[in-house]
Amino acid sequence: MNTRRLTSTVWAVVLTVLYLFLLAPILIVFVESFDTSSYLRFPPEGFGLDAYRQVFANEAFREGFRVSGITAAATALLAVVTGVPAALALTRLRFRGRAAIEAAFLSPLLVPHIVLGLALLLILAPIPLTDTYVGLILAHLGVTVPYVVRTVSASLVSADPRAEEAARTLGASGLMTFWRITLPAIRPGLLSGGIIAFLLSFDETVISLFVSGQHTVPLPVAVLQYVEYRSDPSVASLSVLLVLLSVVVVVLVERGLGLRRTLRSG
C-alpha cells in the first residue's frame, strides 16, 4: 500500500513539473504583459496596465486585427461550405479514387507551411492575388478545409445512416433529407470545424507572410513587423489577449458542442 502511494506521489510530482515546464512560457509572457518598462525584461521592474493601453492605441494592431477577423470569418465560412460536401462524399459514397481524393484533402496537414506559402506565392503572384483579401482567403482555405472534413466526417461516422434512408423512403428529397436529418446530426462537427478553421486562419503566420502585402496585413504579420524594430511589453500584452480569446472560444465550443467528444469519435 505504501509502495502504491509512493508511486502515485512520484507520478503526481512528475506530471506537475511537466505541466509547469510546458506552461512556463505562457506564464512568463503573462507576467511580462504587466511590465511598465519600455522594453522586454524579466523579471519586470513594475506592474501596470500601460502595455494593454498601448495595444488598443496601436493603429497597426487594430488594422491587423480587422484584416485577420475578416479573413478568418470568410475562410471559416468557405471551409464549411466546401468541407461538408467533401466529407459527405468521402463518408457516404464508395467510388474509384476515393482514397486518393481523401489523401489530397488531408495532404496540406503534412506539408510544411513554408513550402505551401512559397507555392501559393508562385501561383497567386502572376494572377495577381497577393496583397488582397481574396488571395489570403484562398491561401488559408488550403490549411483549414482538412479540419472541417475531419470533424464533419467524425460526426457522419457516428450518425445512423438508416435515418436518412428512412426519410428518402418516405418521399423526402435529397435536400430535405440533408436539412432535416443529416445537418442536425453533423452540427457539432460542422460548428467545431468552422471554429477551428477560424482560429487557424486568424493565427496563420507563415503563409500570410508570403501572400500579404502593404494593404492587407494580418495581425500575426503586423506583430512580426512591429518586433522587427522594437520590443516592448505591448507585444506580451497582445499575446495574452489572443491566448485568452482562443481559450474562451475553445471552452465555449467544448461546453456547448462537445468538441472533445466529436474529435475523439474520429
Image: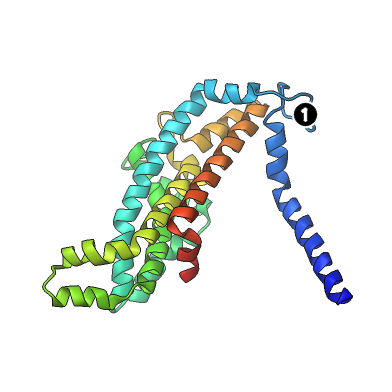
Say whether residue 194 is left or right of residue 95: right
Say whether residue 49 is left or right of residue 258: right
User: Which one is nearer the viewer's eye here, 129 or 159?
Assistant: 159
Task: Residue 231: tell me if it is visible.
Answer: no
SS assignment at label 1 = loop
Give the x, y percent position of residue 59: 49, 22
Task: Residue 68: tell me if it is visible.
Answer: yes
Q: Residue at x 71, y 52 (%)?
A: 22
User: In which quarter of the view is residue 239 placed?
Assistant: top right
Up/down of 125 relative to 33, above or below: below
Identify the residue under disc 1: 44
Query: From this viewpoint, which residue is outermost toward the front?
Result: 1
Q: Residue at x 43, y 57 (%)?
A: 257
User: In which quarter of the view is residue 155 placed?
Assistant: bottom left
Query: From this viewpoint, which residue is outermost toward the left?
Result: 171
Give the x, y percent position of residue 107: 44, 64
Estimate how packed mark 1 is, as few (under 14), some (14 to 19) or many (20 or more) residues with alpha carbons within 10 Å: some
Up/down of 28 relative to 60, above or below: below
